[in-house]
C-alpha cells in the first residue's frame, strides 16, 4: 500500500493482493516506525455512505470505503475511486484510492503484484 500526501490530498495505491484483501476482509493497514513513534495508515470498509471519507486520530489516518465500491473491485476494470470530502467552510480534502500499475520507467521497487499498465508505450 502506497501513500501520497500533498497539501489537502490523500492518495493510496494498492497492489492486486491488497485489492483482494480489502474486498475479502474489509481492512488493510501499514505502519512506519519512527523509533519511539509509529505512523499508521489504514483502509476500512464501511456499510454506510456512498463516497470515500477519511479521519485522523493520533498517529493514524484511516480512509473509509463504502462496501458497494469494493465488492467486485478485484475482478472489474475500475481503476479507482475519488471524492472531495468537506473539512471546513470552504475547504475540502481530496481522496483517491486506486489500483497500482507497473511503472513504465526503470524502478528498483518490486512490481510483480502490480496491475498491468494500460499505457505500455510512453
Image: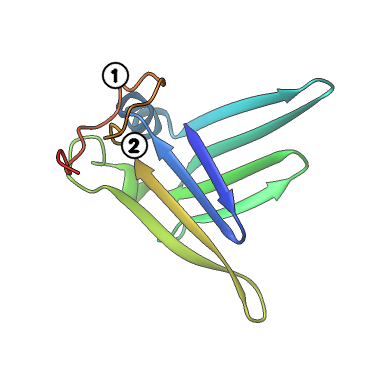
Q: Is residue 17 left or right of residue 33?
A: left
Look at 55% across and 29% down and name the residue there: 29
**In the displayed structure, does residue 122 sit left or right of residue 109?**
left
Q: How many marks?
A: 2
Residue 57: x %, y % from top left: 74, 46
Residue for badge 2: 100
Give me the disc on residue 75: none
Q: Is residue 63 above or below residue 37?
A: below
Q: Are marks 1 and 2 in contact (CB under 8 Å)?
A: no
Nearest to the observer: residue 50 or residue 89: 89
89 left or right of 30 in image: right
Q: Which mark is residue 112?
A: 1
x and y percentages locating residue 51 in the rendered image:
43, 60
**Which quarter of the rendering shows the C terminus?**
top left
Q: Secondary structure at mark 2?
A: loop
- Tell me which label, 1 or 2, sits earlier in the chain: 2
Question: Which residue sits at x=78%, y=42%?
Answer: 58
Q: Position of residue 114 (x, y in %)?
A: 29, 28
Q: Nearer the viewer, residue 3 or 56?
A: 3
Q: Is residue 68 above or below residue 85?
A: above
Q: Position of residue 52 (x, y in %)?
A: 46, 56
Amino acid at each position: 500500500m502506497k501513500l501520497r500526501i500533498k497539501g489537502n490530498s490523500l492518495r493510496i495505491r494498492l497492489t492486486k493482493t491488497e485489492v483482494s484483501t480489502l474486498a475479502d476482509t474489509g481492512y488493510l493497514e501499514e505502519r512506519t516506525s519512527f523509533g519511539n513513534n509509529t505512523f499508521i495508515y489504514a483502509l476500512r470498509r464501511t456499510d454506510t455512505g456512498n463516497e470515500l471519507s477519511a479521519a485522523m486520530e493520533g498517529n493514524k489516518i484511516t480512509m473509509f470505503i463504502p462496501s458497494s465500491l469494493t465488492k467486485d473491485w478485484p475482478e472489474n476494470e475500475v481503476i479507482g475511486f475519488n471524492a472531495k470530502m468537506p473539512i471546513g467552510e470552504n475547504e475540502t480534502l481530496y481522496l483517491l484510492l486506486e489500483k497500482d500499475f507497473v511503472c513504465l520507467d526503470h524502478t528498483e521497487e518490486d512490481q510483480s503484484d502490480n496491475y498491468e499498465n494500460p499505457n505500455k508505450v510512453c
